[in-house]
Amino acid sequence: MRILVFDIGGTEIKYALCDENFTLTDKKSVPTNAHEGGKRIIERVVEIAKTFDGFDRIGISTAGQVDSEKGMIVYATDSIPGYTGTQIKQLVESELGVPCAVENDVNSAALGEAHFGAAKGESNFICLTYGTGIGGAIFIDGKLFKGCGYSAGEFGHFITHANGKNCTCGGNGCYEAYASSGALVRAVIEKTGKNLNGREIFAEFDNPTIRDIIDGWIDEIVVGLKSLVYIFNPSLIVAGGGIMNEQYITDEINKRLKTQLMQSFRCIEVKKAKMGNDANLLGAAYVATKE
Ligand SMILES: [Zn+2]
């Protein structure tokens, strides 16, 4: 079986061919040109697909809230205008005549890690991606738990501080307002006046002020993870996002969880996500095989 896979993000559409051993070849990307709107994005996906031949299925990972049974966008923010309501599966299948599966990008990445990466062989685990915000996914008994509106695992917006900082969701005290890499960047600006990105912050690790900010930020990460461990009792937490390439973070999270959790919940390990940018494409390929 050969699967043509796409990962539609706000800035880039990545695509590749995937064989039956889940090896990706011909990896390429084009700008999304999101301002042209959701319908045009899917037309371009179809145009790209028509330059390939010899594929049996299409798998699509995409930004936005996805009804994966209908293969449509239930809701997308204005970062891709007019994307809400787009019937991706129907449009792609009628143009290309092969089965098409569609899944949300966070879920796709989690499926990629679940079947080919850091969580291979695990049944009960959660995934969190730390970036500007925080995304997440939940696996129970080996299956992705989606919730009634395909949105379960929105860990960025569970509350860790009553009456806390304002959040982009309109609420306040949300986990991502304190524990995202964006929150770390903001904390550094507030306390030092320096506008540094994640890598630059860790380059100043020996500066005691910066070190204190990093340690306080890791405390915020741990506060949320402790609650999640008590709810799901997972064997594994997969932590993704570029900032997690700093080994210190996962080492510290593991150390703090193992001393702060109730004894019976300490059978938990936090691992870095392994598949990087390929996770979404591999997850999309995996869902396409189930189509
Ligand atoms: Zn929020």
Image: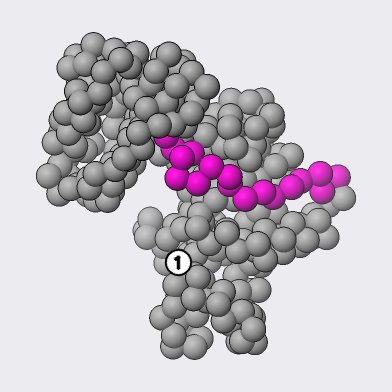
Q: Where is residue 106 in the image (x, y as percent from the top left)?
A: 45, 41
Is residue 278 rendered magenta in the image? yes
Total marks drawn? 1
> Viewer-proximal residue, 202 or 183?
202
- Residue 101 spot, x, y in % from top left: 36, 21
Task: Reply above or below: 271 against 42.
Answer: below
Tell me if residue 203 comes above or below residue 153 in the rendering.
below
Residue 215 magenta-highlighted: no
Q: Which residue is drawn at 56% across and 74% down?
A: 202
Q: Please provide the residue range marked out in magenta.
A: 264-281
Which residue occupies the extreme front position in the image? 26
Q: Position of residue 259 (x, y in %)?
A: 83, 60
Question: How was this image coloured?
Answer: one colour
State the residue in front, 284 or 126: 284
| One can see residue 102 in this view | no
What's the residue type where badge 1 is placed?
A: Gly
Secondary structure, mark 1, is: helix
Quadrant in which the C terminus is drawn: top left
Question: What residue appears at the point 17 percent right and 17 percent down from the top-left corner?
Answer: 95
Q: Callout 1: 10 Å neighbours few (<14), some, many (20+)?
A: some
Splitting the image into 4 quarters, where does residue 85 fall?
A: top left
Which corner quadrant of the image does residue 5 belong to?
Answer: top left
| Residue 45 appears in the rendering | yes
Name the residue carrying label 1: 182
Q: In this view, does 8 lie to the left or right of 202?
A: left
User: Residue 211 vs residue 254: left or right?
Assistant: left
Where is residue 1 drawn, in percent x and y?
A: 43, 13
Q: Residue at x 55, y 29 (%)?
A: 144
Residue at x-position 76% and y-position 62%: 256
Horizontally, residue 254 falls left or right of residue 86, namely right
Where is residue 19, by image quadrant?
Answer: top left
